[in-house]
């Protein structure tokens, strides 16, 4: 009888020691955010003593899923906001003298200064310097955006590799859980420390890409991302992602890769993908500024021998009168005194830009002396007309005041290569002083439009970032709320654990006391 | 409810992060004095800042332009003032030369003063500020007047923008500033009384008035005008004997003491006495309400001569006759002058009373020649040349110099009003600049005292949080075991 009692007591002591181990483990992991509190489930096995049924894990997978989804969204917003903060750093519009607006203002002030005092060498130098500064600034900003883009590409590559690594690790962990479950099935199924590692991986993966988690009875998981693209199927298989050519691809085992760039919804990877779009959009908006400057800004010239239609038009096939342009063009031979009228084109408003060019080029009186017209396709997508006359001998008057002998200030295709024309210095020595008031007036229009383009860019950056930051503030608060709820469910309270430890210790001491009491009983019996 | 240790930490961590962020934001706010640090802090404010920066830059440029206009126009005003003073001095000299008896040497001495005066005027007209000539219009670097007084600058003034839609003339067209409305005939005659041997009609139009004057053999005009054609001419100091001759200069008719007749009666008398020789007299009603007399020999060619012993009635066949006749038929706002050239010959000048009146002069029949205007330098130069040649100035010279003075004064006044407009812009622009700067300051700049208060508040909150953390961690069962 006593022998059986020893067996029961010995088992109880072992179970309580194991319980103490579990509580100690809880205490040790009290500050581990991925750790889930465990409780030893001890059941009465009368008359054969007590039995260690299992290690109970205080987890609700629904809340974990919910938290991870929110975490994915918050990381998406955080990462995107960080990248946008870098863009904000590039465009320091709020510091005096460092913003694109300051450079544009400096250039246009210099332009108006020169139109006011066109013989002033200082004003000429300032225009050249400010034109160089403005174009140099635009070149630099494009490079900055390109650098950010490259860095984003690199980070994306890294993030996708990390996501693949986590998916692979979870696949292996699923297998480990299967083994752990089998090995500990008869000993309380104490394999659940593997589930803490699983939760850690799931959290890390959620930070990279949004995933839906399905858990089976023993804790293995199946993962899919948006629209059901599978990433992990328990222990059967897993899929990898690939970042190539600016796109995120889901690599199927049996079919070609599928582009899921627009499918993923959150996580760092989505943030980086969206940031690439943001950067591309900002670059285009920056290019718009440069293209507009290249297409529009001109100076009045006395001997450029090129007459430009100052107002650009969107459609070269539409009658010019649709743009409010009309007048008569008179072409003069200046070699006689007074100059001889060699040809006229009246009411050119009834012609389109292409037709007007054609009318000039097919007029024998004009083509015979080498006067030609070219429809210029501007970088900003608009069109203008340039009429070239042979050096020195011919001139054009326009009763509509739309065509002026002039030359552009900037050359290039976009913000990456915009620069002042190489001859700007000498061009400024050939200003037509009689037209400076007209061009001063035009400059106000250019200045206003340029400011509009700058505003579009800056508003886009500030609105996008403000929107992301606003959402981040809200979603972060929700995440914290979910985190708290999750912590309340699965977190460890050291005080509670110590209470439990004290209880188990006392019980253990009591059980141990039975051994000595039985021993005394046996001794007494033996001494009888 | 269970409160896990990790939860307490994370709550404190979040609170600490938020307070640190707030503290950091306020620290930067106080250090920089700006309440928006990043574009995204306040997109609306960012938009406003960009807008205001552009407007401030534009307005400051317009202010610079205004200052440029002010400086240059002030200098133009000063130059014109000095020129008008010099012309006034020359006018005094010309009056002396005309009204006093001078020897040729005296006149030449006055001529040398004119030479110096003219040089002074030309130098002033060719003045420049920096690289820009004051009176070349938009041909800023072209010297406006040659030594022979020809204008070679631009015909367009140089304008400067001092507001979005406000342009002001800064460098005027010298060809206009120094142009006068003194019209001079390019044909000259050795004698003022010599027959021109041509006939036609001179038509002078200005504003809504047209003056027509027939000239040639056989046309006589009373060279004075009367306000009442029924009042005896003697009441106007007009009297004399009118004698009619045939082609051989034999007297064939006479009207003595015509001052006793009124204009209408004289016409009746002439038609009665001279009518047999195909001579007719008509009353000329002028547009200013006055009257004069026109006599015509209807024979072709005219074969009679009329002589007035008092030379009140003259044949419009000589420069003197045409001048007299023109002044009799024209309202007082345009006058004809007999003008002696430096070569001693005679020609005709037409000068409106008003400095800004332009004349359109045309001819019917054989023209007397071409009329063209003279600029200030040409007018004074001609006087200089006459004096140097020992010739005294005539009325047209005095009128020309006077007109030059009037013109420069007129231009000075015109440009002065532009300058006044420029100066009126100053308070407007300064006020607008103040408003824009204030608006920008409101949008952009932090209220430092308020920021410091908030900074202090966040610091106290942070310290309190740290205290709570310490106290909370102290509440543990470990202390009771």
Image: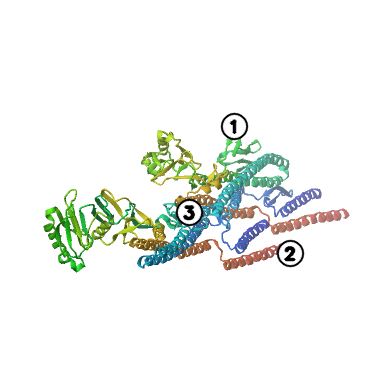
Q: Are marks 2 and 1 on the same chain?
A: no
On the image, numbered disc 2 is attached to which residue?
Answer: B479
Tag 1, which chain?
A
Closer to us: A467 or A473 = A467
Describe the element under mark 2 as helix, strand or loop: helix
Q: Is residue A52 left or right of residue A473?
A: right
The residue that mark 3 highlights is B143
Neighbourhood count class around disc 1 (C-alpha, 10 Å): few under 14, some 14–19, many 20 upward: few
Q: Nearer the viewer, mark 2 or mark 3?
A: 3
Q: What element carries label 3?
A: loop
Query: Whole-percent x and y of residue B2?
Result: 64, 57
Q: Which of marks 3 and 1 is in front?
A: 3
Q: Can residue A179 be seen in this view?
A: yes
Q: Which residue extends farthest top?
A: A254
Q: Position of residue B1 (x, y in %)?
A: 63, 58
SS at mark 1? loop
> Does residue B391 appear left or right of residue A504 in this picture?
left
Q: Nearer the viewer, mark 2 or mark 1?
A: 1
Q: Distance between the residues labelled 3 and 1?
A: 80 Å
Does A231 appear above or below A42? Answer: above
Mark 2 or mark 3: which comes first in sequence? 3
Residue behind mark 1: A256
Which chain contains the residue that carries disc 3? Answer: B
């Amino acid at each position: 009888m006593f022998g059986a009692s020893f067996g029961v007591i010995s088992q109880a002591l072992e179970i309580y020691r194991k319980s103490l181990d579990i509580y100690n483990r809880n205490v040790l992991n009290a500050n581990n955010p991925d750790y889930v509190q465990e409780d030893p489930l001890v059941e009465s096995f009368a008359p054969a003593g007590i039995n260690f049924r299992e290690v109970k894990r205080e987890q609700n997978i629904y809340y974990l899923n919910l938290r991870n989804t929110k975490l994915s969204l918050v990381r998406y917003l955080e990462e995107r906001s960080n990248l946008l903060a870098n863009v904000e750093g590039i465009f320091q519009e709020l510091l005096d003298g460092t913003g694109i607006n300051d450079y544009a203002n400096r250039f246009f002030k210099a332009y108006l200064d020169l139109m006011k005092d066109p013989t002033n060498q200082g004003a000429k130098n300032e225009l050249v310097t400010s034109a160089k500064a403005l174009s140099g600034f635009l070149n630099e900003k494009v490079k900055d955006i390109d650098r950010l883009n490259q860095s984003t590409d690199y980070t994306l590559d890294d993030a996708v590799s990390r996501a693949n690594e986590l998916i692979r690790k979870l696949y292996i962990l699923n297998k480990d859980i299967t083994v752990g479950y089998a090995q500990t099935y008869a000993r309380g199924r104490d394999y659940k420390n593997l589930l803490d590692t699983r939760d850690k991986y799931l959290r890390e993966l959620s930070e990279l890409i949004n995933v839906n988690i399905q858990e089976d009875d023993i804790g293995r998981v199946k993962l899919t991302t948006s629209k059901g693209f599978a990433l992990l199927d328990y222990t059967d298989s897993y899929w990898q992602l690939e970042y190539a050519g600016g796109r995120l691809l889901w690599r199927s085992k049996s079919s070609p890769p599928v582009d899921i760039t627009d499918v993923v919804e959150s996580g760092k990877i989505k943030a980086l993908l969206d940031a690439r779009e943001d950067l591309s959009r900002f670059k285009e908006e920056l290019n718009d500024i440069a293209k507009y400057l290249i297409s529009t800004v001109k100076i009045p010239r006395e001997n450029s021998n090129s007459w430009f239609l100052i107002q650009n038009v969107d459609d070269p096939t539409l009658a010019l009168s649709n743009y409010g342009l009309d007048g008569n063009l008179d072409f003069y031979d200046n070699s006689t005194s007074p100059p001889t009228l060699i040809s006229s084109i009246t009411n050119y408003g009834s012609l389109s830009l292409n037709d007007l060019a054609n009318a000039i080029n097919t007029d024998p009186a004009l083509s015979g002396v080498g006067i030609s017209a070219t429809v210029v396709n501007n970088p900003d997508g608009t069109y203008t007309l340039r009429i070239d006359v042979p050096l020195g001998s011919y001139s054009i008057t326009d009763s509509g005041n739309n065509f002026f002998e002039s030359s552009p200030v900037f050359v290039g295709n976009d913000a990456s290569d915009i620069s002042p024309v190489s001859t700007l210095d000498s061009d400024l020595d050939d200003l037509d002083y009689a037209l400076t008031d007209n061009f001063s007036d035009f400059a106000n229009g250019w200045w206003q439009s340029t400011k509009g383009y700058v505003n579009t860019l800056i508003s886009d950056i500030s609105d996008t970032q403000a929107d992301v930051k606003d959402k981040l503030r809200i979603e972060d608060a929700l995440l914290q709320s979910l985190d708290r709820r999750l912590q309340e469910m699965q977190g460890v309270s050291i005080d509670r654990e110590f209470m439990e430890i004290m209880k188990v210790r006392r019980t253990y001491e009591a059980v141990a006391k039975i051994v000595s009491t039985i021993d005394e009983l046996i001794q007494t019996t033996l001494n009888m | 409810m269970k409160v896990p240790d990790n939860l307490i930490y994370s709550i404190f961590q979040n609170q600490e992060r938020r307070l640190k962020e707030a503290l950091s934001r306020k620290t930067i706010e106080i250090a920089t004095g700006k309440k928006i640090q990043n574009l995204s802090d306040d997109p609306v404010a960012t938009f406003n800042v960009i807008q205001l920066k552009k407007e401030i830059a534009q307005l400051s440029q317009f202010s610079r332009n205004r200052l440029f206009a002010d400086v240059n126009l002030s200098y133009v005003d000063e130059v014109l003032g000095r020129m008008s003073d010099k012309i006034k001095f020359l006018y005094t000299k010309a009056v002396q030369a005309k009204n006093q008896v001078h020897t040729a040497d005296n006149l030449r001495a006055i001529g040398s003063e004119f030479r110096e005066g003219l040089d002074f005027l030309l130098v002033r007209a060719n003045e420049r500020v920096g690289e820009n000539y004051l009176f070349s219009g938009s041909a800023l670097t072209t010297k406006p007047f040659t030594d022979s007084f020809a204008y070679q600058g631009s015909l367009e003034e140089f304008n400067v923008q001092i507001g979005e839609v406000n342009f002001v003339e800064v460098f005027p067209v010298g060809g206009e500033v120094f142009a006068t409305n003194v019209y001079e005939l390019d044909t000259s005659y050795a004698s003022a009384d010599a027959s021109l041997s041509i006939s036609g009609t001179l038509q002078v139009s200005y504003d809504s008035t047209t003056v027509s004057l027939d000239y040639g053999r056989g046309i006589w005009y009373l060279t004075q005008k009367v306000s009442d054609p029924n009042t005896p001419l003697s009441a106007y100091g007009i009297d004399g004997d009118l004698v009619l001759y045939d082609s051989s200069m034999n007297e064939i008719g006479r009207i003595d003491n015509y001052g006793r007749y009124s204009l209408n009666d004289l016409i009746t008398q002439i038609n009665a006495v001279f009518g047999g020789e195909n001579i007719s007299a008509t009353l000329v009603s002028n547009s200013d309400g006055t009257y004069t007399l026109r006599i015509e020999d209807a024979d072709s060619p005219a074969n009679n001569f009329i002589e007035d012993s008092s030379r009140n009635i003259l044949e419009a066949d000589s420069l003197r006759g045409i001048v007299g006749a023109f002044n009799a038929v024209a309202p007082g706002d345009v006058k004809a002058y007999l003008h002696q050239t430096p070569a001693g010959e005679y020609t005709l000048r037409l000068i409106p009373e008003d400095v800004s009146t332009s004349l359109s002069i045309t001819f019917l029949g054989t023209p007397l020649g071409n009329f063209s205007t003279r600029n200030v330098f040409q007018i004074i130069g001609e006087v200089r040349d006459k004096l140097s040649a020992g010739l005294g100035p005539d009325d047209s010279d005095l009128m020309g110099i006077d007109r030059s003075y009037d013109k420069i004064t007129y231009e000075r006044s015109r440009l002065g009003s532009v300058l006044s407009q420029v100066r009126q812009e100053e308070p407007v622009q300064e006020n607008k600049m103040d408003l824009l700067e204030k608006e920008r300051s409101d949008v952009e700049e932090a209220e430092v005292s308020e920021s410091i208060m908030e900074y202090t508040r966040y610091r106290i909150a942070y310290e309190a949080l740290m205290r709570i953390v310490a106290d909370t961690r102290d509440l543990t069962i470990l202390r009771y075991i």
